[in-house]
Image (cartoon, rainbow, N blue to C red):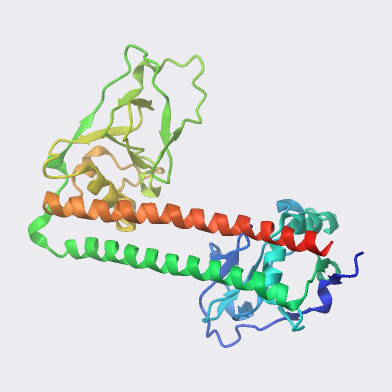
């Protein structure tokens, strides 16, 4: 091993702080992109006093699934407020001033590090990586000034990302608050029924339309059904501007607005359109369908069957605020801006994620 490669364990030590007084409630997990994220675990009956408290400047990692995922989920915590993580995670901090934490995090994001961690993990079903083997990993550690240069660049990128995220959150708050405020104006609260009409146009000529379904993320997707040899003449045609929803899965978000040329969907789907487009914009209505209160409404009013069916008759009974068309256009414009910023934010995160290995490749090559 090259002399400028050092054993990682000589620079770090384990940290184990428990949430004994239950003072911290923010629960986080770590994804395979090496980022903290809100936990999706159901902890309603879990003793959170056993969970570990992570503070700013501490690393956390999940070493149990390295062999399965071929990556080691590991992240550096930079928030000022503490959070809690699973007791199964390992936490560690740097104890040697000759290694900067931001520089180490860029090293840990290299695909070469993941491949090596996968190579040395154990032979269990999940492919775990124990602490001793993790500490034995050799990493390149250049002079502190070189580290500081790369660490400064990394922190600047992170700071820009966080600033962009804050502006995104502010815009989301403005949009959500404004829509919530509309509900308080009883003069614009209208029943949806007079504004919509069900459509049941069938593909009787068996035209070659794409066969699509509707996912629970409120988008059209290619159907998973085997349509080979199937008579598609009974399938429903969906035109530009039509709404489609699965009456058995609307409670989990299975609804979409078509904004392209025609397609066909299963005859069990409900297809409808707005008949008063000078009073109600399709994009505004779709925003309303995207809100969590609408999903809660569907859960409550759906039939008591196994699938909780929400038919078109129930859809017509929905009440929603319908302001002037100018106000609707403004809300839709804000939402489009919000969606564009979300896309740019995700692209920014991906670019930063991809940039770290490139930076570290230069460090390693220079040291070699």
Residue located farthest toward the left when viewing the structure as drawn: 187
Q: Quadrant of residue 87?
A: bottom right
* Rendering coords of residue 10 (x, y %): 83, 78
Looking at the picture, tell me which residue is in the foreground, 36 or 186. 36
Is 264 positioned to the left or the right of 53 in the image?
Answer: left
Query: Is 154 rendered above or below residue 323?
Result: below
Is 24 positioned to the left or the right of 308 in the image?
Answer: right
Query: Is 280 rendered above or below residue 323?
Result: above
Is 161 positioned to the left or the right of 124 in the image?
Answer: left
Quadrant containing the N terminus in the rendered view? bottom right
Looking at the picture, tell me which residue is in the foreground, 273 or 361. 361
Q: Quadrant of residue 261?
A: top left
User: Residue at point 34% right, 68% down?
Assistant: 170
Quadrant containing the C terminus in the rendered view? bottom right
Looking at the picture, tell me which residue is in the foreground, 326 or 232. 326
Q: Quadrant of residue 205?
A: top left
* Rendering coords of residue 235 (x, y %): 36, 22
User: Residue at point 71% right, 64% down?
Assistant: 108
* Rendering coords of residue 195 (x, y %): 14, 41
Q: Is residue 89 visible?
A: no
Query: Is 142 rendered above or below residue 233?
Result: below
User: Residue at point 23% right, 28% down?
Assistant: 199
């Amino acid at each position: 091993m090259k002399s400028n490669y050092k054993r990682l364990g000589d620079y770090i030590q384990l940290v184990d702080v428990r949430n004994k007084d239950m003072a911290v409630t923010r629960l986080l997990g770590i994804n395979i992109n090496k980022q903290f994220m809100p936990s999706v675990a159901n902890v309603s009956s879990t003793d959170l006093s056993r969970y570990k408290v992570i503070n700013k400047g501490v690393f956390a990692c999940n070493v149990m699934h390295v062999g399965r995922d071929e990556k080691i989920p590991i992240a550096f915590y930079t928030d000022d407020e503490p959070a809690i993580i699973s007791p199964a995670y390992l936490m560690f901090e740097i104890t040697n001033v000759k290694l900067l934490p931001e520089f180490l995090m860029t090293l840990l994001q290299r695909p070469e590090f993941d491949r090596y961690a996968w190579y040395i993990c154990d032979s269990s079903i999940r492919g775990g990586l124990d602490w001793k083997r993790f500490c034995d990993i050799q990493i390149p550690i250049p002079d502190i000034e070189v580290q500081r240069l790369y660490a400064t660049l990394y922190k600047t990128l992170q700071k820009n990302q966080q600033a962009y995220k804050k502006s995104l959150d502010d815009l989301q708050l403005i949009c959500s608050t404004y829509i919530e405020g509309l509900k308080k104006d009883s003069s614009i609260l209208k029943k949806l029924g007079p504004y919509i009409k069900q459509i049941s146009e069938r593909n009787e000529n068996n035209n070659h339309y794409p066969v699509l379904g509707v996912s629970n993320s409120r988008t059209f997707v290619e159907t998973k059904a085997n349509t080979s040899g199937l008579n598609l003449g009974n399938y429903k045609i969906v035109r530009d501007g039509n709404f489609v929803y699965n009456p058995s899965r609307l409670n989990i978000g299975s609804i979409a607005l078509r904004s392209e040329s025609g397609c066909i969907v299963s005859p069990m789907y409900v297809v409808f359109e707005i008949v008063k487009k000078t009073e109600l914009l399709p994009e505004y209505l779709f925003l309303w369908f995207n809100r969590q209160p609408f999903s809660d409404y569907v859960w409550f009013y759906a039939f008591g069957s196994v699938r909780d069916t929400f038919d078109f008759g129930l859809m017509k009974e929905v009440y929603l605020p319908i302001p002037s068309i100018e106000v609707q256009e403004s809300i839709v414009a804000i939402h489009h801006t919000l969606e564009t910023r979300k896309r740019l934010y995700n692209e920014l995160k991906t670019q930063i994620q991809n940039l770290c290995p490139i930076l570290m490749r230069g460090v390693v090559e220079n040291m070699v």
